[in-house]
């Protein structure tokens, strides 16, 4: 497990101060930008660890120094669950940028 994931609790529910993702019809997406490829790799690794722990999987698109995370909203999964997952990703990003 990465050091980033060790410092981020998994307790739910998580209440956001604000949201920064786009919601379009049946899709939620969020874009995160970084200064270097090492941060991109650490971020993607942390997302994948979160996916494994929660069994909640998203699409991850990497473009040089940016990562876009998106998910189709499904009827079988409550929207609240997807929102909580994206909030957790935002926390990981915030933790990486506070160092």
Image (cartoon, helix red, strand yellow):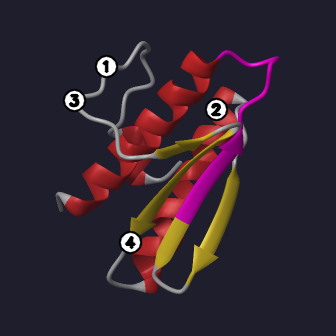
What is the secondary structure assignment of the residue under circle 1? loop
Mark 1 and mark 2: span between their CA atoms? 20 Å
What is the secondary structure assignment of the residue under circle 2? helix
- Residue identifier under label 2: 53
Q: In which quarter of the image is residue 9?
A: top left
Label 4 or label 2, whichever comes before in sequence order: 4
What is the secondary structure assignment of the residue under circle 3? loop
Label 1 or label 4, whichever comes before in sequence order: 1
Picture disc at residue 33: 4
Residue 57 is inside the magenta segment: no
Label 3 or label 4, whichever comes before in sequence order: 3
Q: Nearer the viewer, mark 4 or mark 2?
A: 4
Q: What's the magenta region?
A: 68-78
Residue 77 is inside the magenta segment: yes
Label 3 or label 2, whichever comes before in sequence order: 3
Label 1 or label 2, whichever comes before in sequence order: 1
Mark 3 and mark 1: span between their CA atoms? 7 Å
What is the secondary structure assignment of the residue under circle 4? strand
Picture disc at residue 44: none
User: Mark 3 and 1 residues: CB-CB less than 8 Å, in contact?
Assistant: yes
Mark 3 and mark 4: span between their CA atoms? 20 Å
Q: How many other residues sit within 10 Å of disc 4, few (<14), some (14-19) or many (≥20)?
A: some
- Residue identifier under label 3: 17
Picture disc at residue 15: 1
User: Mark 4 and 2 residues: CB-CB less than 8 Å, in contact?
Assistant: no
């Amino acid at each position: 497990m990465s050091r980033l994931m060790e410092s981020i609790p998994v307790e739910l529910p998580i209440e956001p101060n604000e949201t920064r993702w786009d919601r379009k019809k049946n899709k939620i997406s969020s874009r995160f930008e970084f200064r270097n490829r090492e941060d991109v790799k650490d971020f993607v690794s942390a997302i994948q660890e979160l996916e494994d722990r929660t069994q909640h999987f998203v699409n991850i698109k990497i473009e040089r120094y940016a990562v876009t995370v998106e998910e189709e909203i499904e009827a079988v999964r409550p929207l609240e669950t997807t929102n909580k997952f994206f909030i957790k990703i935002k926390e990981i990003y915030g933790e990486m940028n506070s160092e």
